[in-house]
Image (cartoon, coloured by chain):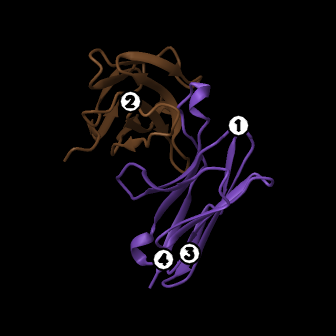
Chain colours: A brown, B purple
Amino acid sequence: DTGVSQDPRHKITKRGQNVTFRCDPISEHNRLYWYRQTLGQGPEFLTYFQNEAQLEKSRLLSDRFSAERPKGSFSTLEIQRTEQGDSAMYLCASSLAYPSGTYNEQFFGPGTRLTVL
Amino acid sequence: QQQVKQSPQSLIVQKGGISIINCAYENTAFDYFPWYQQFPGKGPALLIAIRPDVSEKKEGRFTISFNKSAKQFSLHIMDSQPGDSATYFCAAILPAWAGSYQLTFGKGTKLSVIP
């Protein structure tokens, strides 16, 4: 399977704990995106990387959230001191960056479902 | 501020019928409008997309109608099948020169096609 993969698929944690999610994009894709999807809502943008550079962050990405893409391949999203309001599906997507000036389709992974007790 | 409004929230259609989902947007700078299909336990997958200089785009049983002056667009699924039962999201994105690549999604429509 050469699609976007995410690990773990499900995570249950207690309030106040730290959690980390991993995303492996499609191998030739230079852009990687994180979205959050709560029940009954559409995905909401969190941040995106082009190669290893984090180029855009949403206001939703509070200082408890940090994302990295150290070698321009896989990415991690860490949430520190989790709160019940962090319970959601965290989706990763990837796309090509070229050709520039056009929309390059974002391919989504299956998501990591986080439940904070 | 919800920039893309989607309706209805849920839709039940008989097999063979037409499913219609509507979206309205506020930001006239958006210049690409994709529709995504999401099955339970899966991430969204691109279904069909349109640019605002085109009034209609058809791919198989799926058609997007676009009304730029009204800032509205809709998805029509012809000959709806039980396998089409999923949640559908409309979305919008700014042009590449804006330097922002985030998709702005509607809240979704849960479609159930009954035999």
Circle 3 packing at 10 Å, graded few (<14), some (14-19), many (20+), is few
Label 3's element?
A: strand
Cβ–Cβ under 8 Å for marks 3 and 1: no
Marks 1 and 4, the one that precedes in the sequence: 1
Q: Which mark is residue A32?
A: 2
Cβ–Cβ under 8 Å for marks 1 and 4: no
Q: Position of residue A31 (x, y in %)?
A: 39, 29
**Residue kind at label 2, given as amino acid type:** Leu
Does residue A86 appear left or right of residue B31 in this picture? left
Please tell me which residue is depicted at 49% across the width and 60% down the height of the picture: B87
Visible in this render: residue A80?
no
Q: Nearer the viewer, mark 3 or mark 1?
A: 1
Label 4's element?
A: strand
- Cα–Cα gap, marks 1 and 4: 35 Å
- Cα–Cα gap, marks 2 and 3: 35 Å
Marks 4 and 3, the one that precedes in the sequence: 3
**Residue kind at label 4, given as amino acid type:** Val
Does residue B96 appear left or right of residue A16 in this picture? right
- Cα–Cα gap, marks 1 and 2: 23 Å
- Cα–Cα gap, marks 3 and 1: 33 Å
Label 4 and label 3 in one chain: yes
Q: Which residue is mark 1?
A: B29
Label 1's element?
A: loop
Marks 3 and 1, the one that precedes in the sequence: 3
Does residue B51 appear left or right of residue B113 in this picture? right
**Along the viewing direction, whichever of A84 and A49 lies nearer the viewer:** A49
Q: Which mark is residue B113?
A: 4
User: As displayed, is residue B12 above or below residue B101?
Assistant: below
Visible in this render: residue B97?
yes
Q: Nearer the viewer, mark 1 or mark 2?
A: 1
Q: Position of residue B59 (x, y in %)?
A: 48, 67
Q: Position of residue A39 (x, y in %)?
A: 51, 48
